[in-house]
Structures are given as C-alpha cells and as structure tokens.
Image (spheres, rainbow, N blue to C red):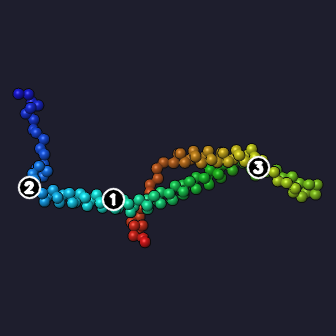
Amino acid sequence: MPKIYSRNKIQIPSLIVNIKNKRKVILIMVFLTAIIVSGKIMLSAINPIFETLCEDKAKSIATMISNEQATNVMREHSYDELFTIEKDTNGNITMIKSNVIPINEIISDVAIKIQEEIDKQGREDIEIALRKFYRN
C-alpha cells in the first residue's frame, strides 16, 4: 500500500465533537464573547483620543513645515521687489503698488516647498498616555 494511505488522520478536538463537554464549550464561548465585547468597548473609548492626538500632531507638523519653508523662500526675496512706492515732488508717499508677479512666485514657491517637505515626512509615532483615559 502507498505511503499516503498510511498517514495519520487529522484529529478533531474532542471538545467540539463530544457533546458531553457542553460546560467547557459554553465556558469557552462565554470567554470569547467577553473578550470580543471588551475589545470593542476599549477600541471605542480609545478611538476619539487617538484621532484627536493624530490631528494635533498633523497640525503641529504642518505648522512647523509651513513656517520653515516660508522663511526659507523669503530669504531669497526682498520687500523692495514686492512693492513700488511712488512719491510726489515733496517726498510724500502718494501710492504703494504691489508687484503681482513676484508675490505670485513667492506664494507658489512656498506652497510647492511645503508640499515637498510634507511628502518627505515619514511616519510619526503617536503615544497615548494612560492618564488620558481617566480624565473627565
């Protein structure tokens, strides 16, 4: 006879097959249900805290990146190229004109550099302190 027919058969636990062990089956089912319900309750309690922490962290990262990139872009420009001041014969300021082209270049440069820096960011770790669960 070939070797394949002489292998051991899969053993099904007697716990499931044997109905005499009803108490064990019921006890295991109660524990599994309790674990699943407890997990659901804990996750529903943690989720709002976790979402708030993630939003705060994202805002913090975005603020730091935008401030840093705006400063870097403005280092390349001077305020004199952004505005033209016209004066009358007495030296009084009559008009301040904004130069739209350099201003638009700055705005687009800042936006592009911010997006590039955000794309470079890796994953950030978020930690939830246990004391946050006990606050009212």
- Graded by Cα atoms within 10 Å as few (under 14), some (14 to 19) or many (20 or more), the crowding at tag 2 reads few
Residue 17 percent coordinates (x, y): 11, 49
Q: Is residue 127 visible?
A: no
Would you say 119 lies left or right of 107 here?
left
Q: Which residue is mark 2?
A: 20
- Indicate which label's residue lies in the foreground, 1 or 3: 1
Q: Residue furthest right?
A: 89
Q: Residue furthest left?
A: 1
Image quarter where the C terminus lies is bottom left
Residue occupying the point 5% across, 27% down: 1
| Quarter of the rendering containing residue 31 | bottom left
Pick the front one: 100 or 30? 30
- Identify the mark nearer the N-term, 2 or 3: 2
Residue occupying the point 65% across, 52% down: 71
What is the secondary structure assignment of the residue under circle 3? loop
Tell me how far mark 2 sits from mark 3, CA to CA.
Answer: 88 Å
- Identify the mark nearer the N-term, 1 or 3: 1
- Identify the mark nearer the N-term, 1 or 2: 2
Residue 70 percent coordinates (x, y): 65, 51
Q: Which residue is mark 3?
A: 82
Q: Amino acid at mark 2?
A: Lys
Q: Amino acid at mark 3?
A: Leu
Residue 2 percent coordinates (x, y): 8, 28
